[in-house]
Amino acid sequence: MGQRYNTYVGYFKKRYGERLQKIVIDAGFSCPNRDGTLGTGGCTYCDNAAFHPSYSSPDKSIISQINEGIEFHRKRYRTANHYLAYFQPFSNTYAPLNELKKVYEEALSHPLVSGIVIGTRPDCIDDEKLDYFQELSKRKIVVLEYGIESIHDKTLKRINRCHTYAQSVEAITKSAARGITLGAHFIFGMPGESKEDMMDMAYEINNLPLHSVKFHQLQIIRGTAMEKEFKEHPGDFVHFTIDEYIEFFVDFLELLKPEIYIERFAGEVPPRFVDMTPWGSIRNAELLRMLEKRLEERNTRQSARFHPQH
């Protein structure tokens, strides 16, 4: 697996010599587009409960979440001996630095935790926090994962992100200048975007100093503002069948630079959170097999059509 593209698991094995399993931590943070600082309601597609496991809850201590997460993952991934505390729900740098240090250091005090992965927004970072991450990365694994979602400002405005793509570029550039390991998250199928708009993201990603990227297809979560928008304006959305999505992503993968690692190319949400599951109950492992099969059938690979001048 992964011979035709760079896998994120392969990245950690290559750099640190072992598989490192992420454990999702909910530290109780919020977002500036949720608490009224920049906006209210949060991102229109977002329900964080649909994207993180039951052991991850802000009413539990950081150490308790880690211990429960280790037990959860030991049943699934028996090859993992060390872990990364993944601060995922909401914006995990959205607090004063002294508060952030407490939760990060608590996670890093666990003997089986080798580092932290911090999911956040590009407008929730500053020089003081980046200086801290730079120093911390000298003794522990530190990965900053920026939610970018789209390179198109019209889309970011429509989905209530309350930041611009230029802010994403600035945050990533400042982080990279400090030698911090960087990931980013993008969503395919946002309202108003064509397949060409989505494909343009490959060229932008190639120009960013990212180590890894994570992609999801848009999933319409029950009870979100996006669900209402989807029902009222279904023609504004690109509807991918599973085969169309695989084909689209192979085309996308061919354009990506060879050194970037792919953490995920599709997502899955528990059925209780969605009104419809157009792909059925297919799991990520099967999606990966389908992707690899299609890459083999087309005899292609990541960066097959990559041109540095773009």
Image (tube, rainbow, N blue to C red):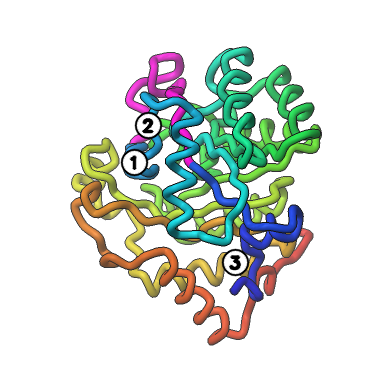
- The first of marks 3 and 1 along the sequence is 1
Do the numbered discs 2 and 3 sit on residues whose CB atoms are within 8 Å? Answer: no
Badge 1 amino acid: Ser
Asked whether, in this view, residue 6 is left or right of residue 279, the answer is: right
Disc 3 from disc 1: Cα separation: 33 Å
Taking the magenta stretch, the answer to whether it contains residue 206 is no
Q: Nearer the viewer, mark 3 or mark 1?
A: 1
Q: Position of residue 137 (x, y in %)?
A: 75, 34
At label 1, counting other C-alpha atoms closer than 10 Å, the crowd grade (few under 14, some 14-19, many 20 or more) is few
Asked whether, in this view, residue 226 is left or right of residue 175, the answer is: left
Taking the magenta stretch, the answer to whether it contains residue 43 is yes
Q: Which residues are magenta?
A: 24-44
Task: Return the residue at label 3.
Answer: 253
At label 2, counting other C-alpha atoms closer than 10 Å, the crowd grade (few under 14, some 14-19, many 20 or more) is some
From the image, which quarter does the N terminus lie in? Answer: bottom right
Along the viewing direction, whichever of 134 and 112 lies nearer the viewer: 112
Q: Is residue 221 above or below residue 89?
A: below
* Among the 4 quarters of the image, the one containing residue 223: top left
Dot 3: element: helix
Magenta stretch: helix, strand or loop mostly: loop
Q: Say if residue 154 shows up in the picture.
A: no
Task: Return the residue at label 2.
Answer: 57
Asked whether, in this view, residue 38 is left or right of residue 282, the answer is: right
Do the numbered discs 2 and 1 sit on residues whose CB atoms are within 8 Å? Answer: yes
